[in-house]
Image: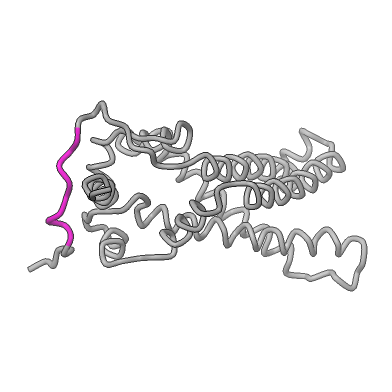
Amino acid sequence: MTRTPGSATRMATAPPSSRHLKRYGRTERALHWVHATAFCILLGSGLCMYLPSLAEIVNRRPLLKSIHLYTALSWAIALLLILILGDRRSLRATLREVEYFDSDDRYWLLGQRSPQGRLNAGQKLNTILTAVFAILFAISGFFLWYGERDTRFQIPNALLLHDWLMYASLMLFLGHLYLALILPKTRHSLNGITRGWVRADWAAGRHAKWVEALEASEEEPR
């Protein structure tokens, strides 16, 4: 007998499709798009420097290095400003949500149908990997840049780490684009990170625990 998640029996009834649920606030959306924009510029300039065919076509390596460097610096400053000036309470709540994996999340990762919160287990894992990769990119990139100016800080494996992070990040990025732009059943999630809301019927089918929690909070006496 296959074990089913204990909370699977609590799947929410799909609300009317005309109802909208707020999924991401302005600070979360700003954080996402700042990171996404910087990532695309860094990936493009990095590939143009790394791949011989692209490097030959562009043939402007000093310019590409400057774009790469100043984009990374701007990315770090922009993220810091968002953390300082944005809604830190919502960011802390999102961080707690990302860090917490329950039994339903584990069932989801094993390919079993189970109710999910505002972020499903895959989105939590993607967020964690994105943060870890960003930190490793920044550290290895710093030593690559500073090592050119002071040979005492040259680390032989820094370039290797930077390259492998690029490959892994590219795979994650392509998968992310497929789910957000192409796959019909997940494509609506893009609405949450652009407009901030998703349809309640869509959320009930894919994030039942989140919908239930919202409905419970609405029913609580004020």
Compared to residue 104, the image places residue 80 above or below, namely above
Mark count? 0
Q: Residue furthest front?
A: 222
Q: Quadrant where the N terminus lies?
A: bottom left
Q: Residue furthest left?
A: 1
Name the spot of residue 45 as percent of width and height, x first: 73, 42
The image quadrant of residue 33 is top right
Q: Left or right? Give the position of 48 relative to 147.
A: left
Q: Left or right? Give the position of 58 relative to 108.
A: right
Query: Depth check: 101 or 38 in front?
Result: 101
Q: Is residue 171 magenta?
A: no
Going 86% across and 64% down the picture, which residue do you hit?
A: 147
Q: Is residue 8 magenta?
A: yes
Query: Depth check: 196 or 134 in front?
Result: 196
User: Which stretch is magenta?
Assistant: 7-15
Compared to residue 157, the image places residue 91 above or below, namely above
Going 78% across and 37% down the picture, which residue do you hit?
A: 56
Q: Residue furthest top?
A: 18
Going 78% across and 34% down the picture, which residue do you hit?
A: 58
Query: Depth check: 148 or 71 in front?
Result: 71
Name the spot of residue 165 as percent of width and height, x first: 61, 58
Going 31% across and 53% down the picture, which residue do you hit?
A: 117
- Here the colouring is one colour
Query: Depth check: 24 or 40 in front?
Result: 24
Q: Left or right? Give the position of 82 relative to 4.
A: right
Name the spot of residue 138 as percent of width and height, x first: 70, 59
Name the spot of residue 118 as percent of width and height, x first: 35, 49
